[in-house]
Amino acid sequence: MRWPKQVQIKEVGPRDGLQNETTWVETDDKVAWINMLSESGIKEIEYSSFVHPRWIPALKDAREVGRRINRYPDVTYSALVPNEVGLEHALEAGIDMASVFMSASETHNRNNINKSITATYPVIGNVVKTAKAENKRVTGYVSTVFDCPFEGKVDIDAVLRVCDRLFELGIDDLSLGDTIGTAVPSEVEALLEAVTHRYPNKSIIMHFHDTRGMAIANIMTAMNYGITRFDSSLGGLGGCPYAPGAAGNVATNDLLYLLQGLDVATGVDDHIIQDASSFIQTKLNKQLPSRSFNYLESQLNQANDHVQAAGAEMPNHSFELVPQRKREIIYVFLKNQLKNQYDKFRSKE
Ligand code: HMG
Ligand code: MG
């Protein structure tokens, strides 16, 4: 197995993460959350979606969010854009990059964007043309590259046909989506074998949903094929409303844990990611699925109990805690636990 020295993470939580949520997140909270993400060292953030608000009500405030977020000069802000109406709104709100999208399977494409695959190309062609005239980069998402929730297995040839057309239309980056999280590493290998041979010099991003817990194994496989760009979502939020049962994206928290362990540079501060995950968990009032996030939260909660039992004051857990402070509290907590174990051991001697 080989892995790269550096990986670029695109945070899609504010778009893919929220698009499927029924709990409304206030615009102020979205803005505060995206600002935290901008501070984390993440270099690409998909901040919202300029689709029809009737189709994705959770993101109906995309224009306001785009106008109000702080823009960090070293961060690329993108948004999902289905057509020219969406692009017009996105340009007004401010984007560095437009993300166009379609599926490799006919039925998912029709369910998702109300058009056949053939009828989608001219729409995307016009978006790419206008975006380019405005000096914006364009990412082309292809969904259902392994399986379609309606048609089952999707042929690699069908995927390549769509990728060919998107490159002809002028996209800069290609993002391949395991929309319903069905792939296993052998399937990732088969697809990337074909894709990397056909487009040796193109920028390829992998977008794994983690429905069956395969995303990290699939990312390892993709890194072995030289892929260095991955989409992920804070806490593992996400899903496509037009892919029933699909779970969230691979969690940024879990991906960071993997990459840090492998010594792969990301430039992302995992403490800010933890705080930003706690923040959105509170706003959505539901437990996020990421295991790394939940483990660290449980450690913090134990530390909190420990500090309270000792009659000490602990700052309001955990969003308000600065990352360094958290590290210290966990450290003190673990040290005390070890000391207790040591004392028990000695008392039995
Ligand atoms: P449509 O109804 O076919 O659109 O929807 P239309 O072109 O026939 O227009 C109908 C009306 O909608 C018109 O208004 C348009 O102006 C308006 P009217 O003349 O009747 O007053 N309209 C719009 N309004 C606001 N914003 C727009 C817009 N476009 C048209 N952009 C459309 C077509 C694509 C808009 C619709 O199907 C839609 O919004 N779909 C949303 C699909 C979606 O967001 N899915 C989830 C994201 S994709 C995903 O999650 C997968 C991904 O993560 C990768 C992976 O996991 O695989 C990317
Ligand atoms: Mg997705």
Image (cartoon, helix red, strand yellow):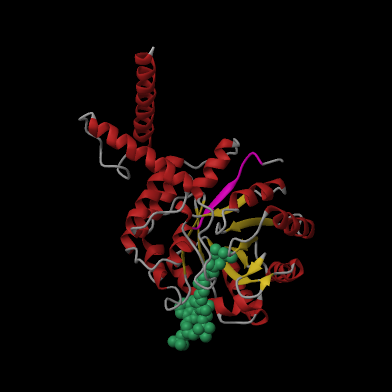
| Residue located at (48% from left, 74% from top) | 51
Residue situated furthest front in the rendering: 348
Check the image and report above or below for 8 versus 329: below
Segment tinted magenta in the rendering: 4-12
Taking the image as shown, residue 299 lies to the left or right of residue 248, namely: left
Taking the image as shown, residue 63 lies to the left or right of residue 174, namely: left
Is residue 47 something one can see in this rendering? no
Q: Nearer the viewer, residue 259 or 126?
A: 259
Check the image and report above or below for 121 versus 248: below
Q: Quadrant of residue 150?
A: bottom right
**Where ligand 2 lies, by quadrant?**
bottom right
Is residue 315 something one can see in this rendering? yes
Where, quadrant-wise, is the C terminus in this rendering?
top left
Check the image and report above or below for 129 versus 220: below
Q: Nearer the viewer, residue 86 or 27?
A: 27
Residue 7: in magenta span: yes
| Residue located at (45% from left, 67% from top) | 20
| Residue located at (79% from left, 56% from top) | 197
Residue 30, how many percent across, how many down?
A: 37, 59
Taking the image as shown, residue 156 lies to the left or right of residue 267, namely: right
